[in-house]
Image (cartoon, rainbow, N blue to C red):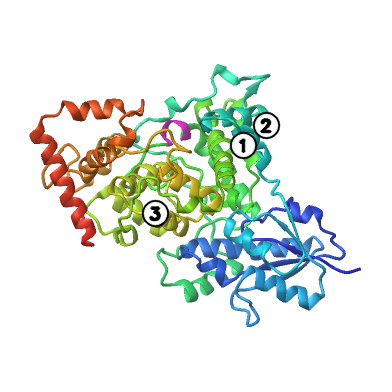
C-alpha cells in the first residue's frame, strides 16, 4: 500500500490532531522538521525557538512509542531542506508517497506555501478549537459590530462552561469589573512551576545558543514545561496555589514581580501540549469545589473561550492582508528601546526587560504599556506586529496579529475594538507601582519631567480628532481637552512634539 505523509507542525503537538486522526498508523509516515524558514521569518526569541524544538522532539518520541513511523529532521541535519515544503518534497521522494495530510496551519503564510506545493494536499480543519471557521463566519454575518462579548456568550452556551441551564451561573456573564484591583502589597504565589532541562532540552539549548545567540532574548536559565505531563503539572500547581487570587489582580503590574498570579500556560495551549477545553473544565471544577471565586474562574475562562477563540475567528475572517492594515496611517519606526530596554520610562523598561528574559509579559503589560506607547507615538503597526510575533513564546500569527493589529494598535479601523486602547500615565500608576520607581513624574502634565504617556495621550487624541470625536466612548476625553485653557493646551502639544522629535532622531526617552 502506498504511504502518505502526515505533517505535524511545531504548534500542533496534540495526540488528537485532526491530521493524526485521519492517518493510518500502519502505512502513513509522520513528517516533523525544525527548519530555518520557520525559525527565522521573524527574529524569534531564543526561548521560543528552544521551547518549540524541545517540545517537538519529545512529541515525536511519544508518537514513535505509540507505534507511528516518524521522520524527524533536526535543524542541524545536513539534509535539512530549510523549509516545511522542502522537507515534505524531500520525504515524498524518499518514500514515493502519494500525498500529504495536514491540519490547517495557524498562519496564512504557511497555508499558502502548502497550497502552492507540487504535492497532492489534503488540508483538514484544526478541530482543537471550539469554534470552526464556518461557525465564526455565521456568527459574524450581518453584524454591524463584531464584539467579543456576544461571541463569548455563544461559546459559553456551546461548551456549557459556568452555565446553569441556559443562564450563566450567579446570574452574570462577565465579572470583569471585579478583576481590576491595583497591584497588591504582597503576592503569596512564587510564580509558575519551573523545570530543570533534561538531556533533550539541553541538546536543543546548545543548538539554539549556537544558531540564534544574537537574537533578542535571554536563553538561559530555561525553565519551561516542554511536554504534556510537565504542562499539566504546572497547570495543577497554578490552580491550587494562584487561581483564587488570579481574578482580583489579573490586570495588576509590579516592579519586582514578573508573574503575580498568572498561569503562564498560554505557551503550552498554543503549541498543543494542553487542550484548551480541558484546561477550562479544570478551572470550572475549582469553582464548583469552592476553591476559586467566580470572578477568577470566569475571567480565566473568558480569556480562552472568549478572547482566544474570537481572535482566531477575526484572523481567518479578515484574510491574509490583515497584518498590513494601517487605518491610522502610523509610520514612525519602532524605537530601539523596544529591543534594549534603554528608556527612562520605567514601565516600558521593565516590560521590555521582562520580555527579554522570560519571553513573556502578561496581557496588560502588552496592551497598556508597550502597546499603548506604540499607539500613542504613532509607530508603524506592521513593525509593532512583527515585534510581538518575535519576542513572545506564545505568539503565533493567528492569535498575535488580531491582538496587535486590532486590539492594541487600532490598525484595523475598529473591527476588534470600539475605541483605541489608549491611556495617560494615570492608568499605569493606578494598576502598578512602576511610577514610584520612574525618573519621570506621572503627576506632571507638562514640562521636562512629565510622563511621556501624559503628553502623547493628548497628542494622539488631537491628531486623530476627526476620526474619534464622535465616538460615544471618547466624548468625555475631548470635552476635558476643550475645557483646558489655551496656554496649557499649547504646552502639552509642544512638549509632545519634543518627545516625538527625539523618537524620530533615534534618541532614547
Viewed as shown, does residue 5 lie left or right of 279? right
Marks 2 & 1, CB-CB < 8 Å contact: yes
* CA distance for labels 1 and 3: 30 Å
Label of residue 384 in the image: 3
Q: Secondary structure at mark 1?
A: helix
Q: Secondary structure at mark 2?
A: helix
Label of residue 280 in the image: 1
* CA distance for labels 2 and 1: 10 Å
Q: In the figure, residue 218 lies in which quadrant?
A: bottom left
Which residue is pictured at 49% across the width and 50% down the height? 401
Q: Secondary structure at mark 3?
A: helix
Label of residue 308 in the image: none
Q: Which residue is mark 2?
A: 159
Instruction: Please state which of residues 503 and 79 is positioned toward the viewer in this rendering.
Output: 503
The region drawn magenta spans 246-250
**Residue ranking furthest to the left:** 487
- Residue 25 in sight from this viewpoint: yes
Amino acid at each position: 500500500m502506498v504511504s502518505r505523509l502526515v505533517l505535524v507542525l511545531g504548534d500542533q503537538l496534540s495526540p488528537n490532531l485532526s491530521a493524526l486522526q485521519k492517518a493510518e498508523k500502519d502505512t502513513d509516515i509522520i513528517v516533523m522538521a525544525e527548519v530555518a524558514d520557520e525559525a527565522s521569518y521573524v527574529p524569534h526569541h531564543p526561548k521560543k525557538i528552544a521551547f518549540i524544538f524541545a517540545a517537538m522532539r519529545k512529541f515525536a518520541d511519544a508518537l514513535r512509542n505509540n507505534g507511528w513511523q516518524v521522520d524527524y529532521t533536526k535543524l542541524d541535519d545536513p539534509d535539512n531542506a530549510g523549509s516545511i515544503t522542502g522537507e515534505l518534497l524531500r520525504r515524498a521522494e524518499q518514500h514515493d508517497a502519494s500525498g500529504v495530510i495536514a491540519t490547517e496551519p495557524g498562519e496564512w503564510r504557511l497555508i499558502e506555501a502548502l497550497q502552492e506545493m507540487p504535492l497532492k494536499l489534503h488540508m483538514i480543519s484544526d478541530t482543537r478549537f471550539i469554534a470552526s471557521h464556518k461557525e465564526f463566519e455565521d456568527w459574524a454575518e450581518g453584524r454591524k459590530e463584531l464584539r467579543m462579548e456576544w461571541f463569548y456568550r455563544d461559546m459559553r452556551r456551546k461548551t456549557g462552561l459556568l452555565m446553569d441551564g441556559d443562564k450563566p451561573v450567579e446570574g452574570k456573564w462577565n465579572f470583569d469589573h471585579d478583576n481590576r484591583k491595583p497591584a497588591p502589597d504582597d503576592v503569596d504565589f512564587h510564580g509558575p512551576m519551573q523545570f530543570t532541562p533534561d538531556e533533550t532540552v539541553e541538546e536543543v539549548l546548545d543548538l539554539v545558543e549556537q544558531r540564534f545567540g544574537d537574537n533578542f532574548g535571554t536563553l538561559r536559565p530555561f525553565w519551561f514545561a516542554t511536554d504534556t505531563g510537565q504542562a499539566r503539572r504546572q497547570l495543577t500547581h497554578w490552580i491550587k496555589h494562584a487561581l483564587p487570587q488570579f481574578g482580583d489582580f489579573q490586570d495588576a503590574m509590579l516592579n519586582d514581580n514578573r508573574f503575580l498570579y498568572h498561569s503562564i500556560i498560554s505557551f503550552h495551549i498554543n503549541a498543543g501540549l494542553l487542550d484548551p477545553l480541558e484546561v477550562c473544565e479544570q478551572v470550572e471544577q475549582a469553582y464548583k469545589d469552592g476553591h476559586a471565586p467566580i470572578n477568577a474562574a470566569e475571567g480565566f475562562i473568558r480569556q480562552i473561550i472568549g478572547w482566544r477563540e474570537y481572535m482566531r475567528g477575526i484572523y481567518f475572517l479578515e484574510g491574509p492582508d490583515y497584518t498590513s492594515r494601517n487605518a491610522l496611517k502610523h509610520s514612525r519606526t519602532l524605537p530601539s528601546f523596544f529591543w534594549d530596554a534603554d528608556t527612562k520610562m520605567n514601565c516600558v523598561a521593565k516590560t521590555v526587560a521582562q520580555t527579554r528574559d522570560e519571553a513573556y509579559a502578561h496581557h496588560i503589560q502588552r496592551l497598556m504599556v508597550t502597546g499603548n506607547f506604540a499607539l500613542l507615538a504613532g509607530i508603524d503597526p506592521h513593525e509593532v506586529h512583527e515585534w510581538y510575533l518575535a519576542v513572545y513564546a506564545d505568539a503565533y500569527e493567528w492569535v498575535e496579529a488580531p491582538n496587535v493589529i486590532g486590539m492594541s494598535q487600532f490598525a484595523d479601523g475598529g473591527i476588534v475594538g470600539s475605541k483605541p486602547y489608549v491611556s495617560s500615565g494615570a492608568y499605569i500608576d493606578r494598576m502598578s507601582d512602576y511610577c514610584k520607581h520612574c525618573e519621570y513624574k506621572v503627576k506632571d502634565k507638562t514640562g521636562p519631567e512629565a510622563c511621556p504617556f501624559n503628553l502623547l495621550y493628548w497628542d494622539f487624541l488631537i491628531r486623530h480628532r476627526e476620526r474619534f470625536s464622535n465616538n460615544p466612548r471618547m466624548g468625555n476625553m475631548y470635552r476635558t481637552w476643550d475645557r483646558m485653557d489655551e496656554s496649557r493646551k499649547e504646552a502639552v502639544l509642544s512638549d509632545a512634539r519634543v518627545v516625538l522629535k527625539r523618537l524620530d532622531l533615534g534618541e532614547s526617552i
